[in-house]
Image (tube, rainbow, N blue to C red):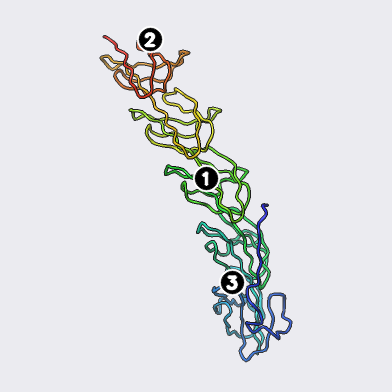
Amino acid sequence: MPHLQVLRTVVIGLTGLGLAGCTSGPDEVCSFENSPVTGLQVIAGTDAYFYADAEGGREVGYKRLNGLLELEPGAYHARLNGSRHPVIIRSGQVTRCTAADIMVLGTSGEYYYVLDTVGTELAYERLGQPLSFFPGTYTAKLNNTVLPTDLPGGEATELSAGALVVTGTTDEYYYVLDTAGTELAYSRLGEPLAFFPGQYVAKVNNSTTGTEVGAEETTTVSTGTVVGRGTTDDYYYMLDTAGTELGYARLGNPLAYLPGPYSIRVTNSAARMTVEPDQITEIVTGTVIVSGTGTDYYYVLDGQGEELGYNRLNDQTPLLEGSYSVRQGDRTDPVTITAGETTTVGRED
């Protein structure tokens, strides 16, 4: 579990809310005070509402925190943002219960969630805004990262998140995974995500890199941009160094990748390349045309004679710069492909 900076401060002065002179209460959360009004008061530092449920779960009233809810004497459950606490209301007394506040600090404008010990979601709020609960043990969740925390009565617990942003020049998405490979959240390139501090993996177009998020810090991971260019409507493919296909796009359309070595493939012709952060790498194809009459096909072979692709006569085939051969019928001719140029091989009937 990553270490978090946790700051606890007193929410409110209890004497300032009229709790001085309270007799000992039924537990550490609630106490009694003689009063001309019989009822329930829940003390906390937020502006939420608390509710009173009779036995069996029937709601009998609600009030803003720090206000006094008049009730008939008896046994109830006080309810606050999904947390519950049993209370006794005595005639001629106010039962005062002291709640706890929690707030997750962050800069991304996202929401955090609070769960009970069995994982049931109780409430949520924007980062930087507090929530109140009855004292106990809870779990804070932020973009599927979790942190168990104890909430003592009469105090505010602040948990500091960090942010991760993957930048790039395309309109694509990045994904954040935990170290076991489980996807936690995703966002457009350039838009930050908040997480509790720890080790994570950023993924863009199936390229990955490990990274660390610190409390109250923003970690930036920069991608580079790859563009396979050409004059046809074909696709180019990106592969890792082991030959695994990572992604593809039409020629002329950019893709974002994390920095590192890759291979680009067009019509099964391949070339090695390196993606640099915050830079655009362009790979320009050439084309070959075998001209002739009729509707026959021609085939493109690499330098070892392996077939790379085929096309109809008079149609362009994109290839990366290099030496190849074309075969049509029983004739094979060598061709040299130059980036940005078209090489034509003539055929007669």
Please state which of residues 81 and 146 is positioned toward the viewer in this rendering. 146
Q: Quadrant of residue 132?
A: bottom right
Q: Does label 1 or label 2 sit earlier along the sequence?
A: 1
Residue at image location 66% in from the left, 66% down from the top: 8
The label number, if any, that marks residue 80 in the structure image: 3
Task: Answer left or right for 16 relative to 24.
Answer: left
- Disc nearest the viewer among 1 and 3: 1
Where is residue 230 drawn, in percent x and y? 36, 28
User: From what the image shows, is residue 121 above or below residue 133?
Assistant: above
Q: Amino acid at mark 1?
A: Tyr
Q: Does label 2 or label 3 sit earlier along the sequence?
A: 3
Task: Answer left or right for 94 relative to 60.
Answer: right
User: From what the image shows, is residue 3 above or below residue 168?
Assistant: below
Q: Furthest residue to the top?
A: 330
Q: Which residue is mark 2?
A: 332
Please state which of residues 79 and 241 is positioned toward the viewer in this rendering. 241
Identify the secondary structure beneath mark 3.
strand
The label number, if any, that marks residue 175 in the structure image: 1
Identify the secondary structure beneath mark 2.
strand
Identify the secondary structure beneath mark 1.
strand
Residue at image location 57% in from the left, 61% down from the top: 105
Residue at image location 57% in from the left, 67% down from the top: 130
User: From what the image shows, is residue 73 above or below residue 52?
Assistant: below
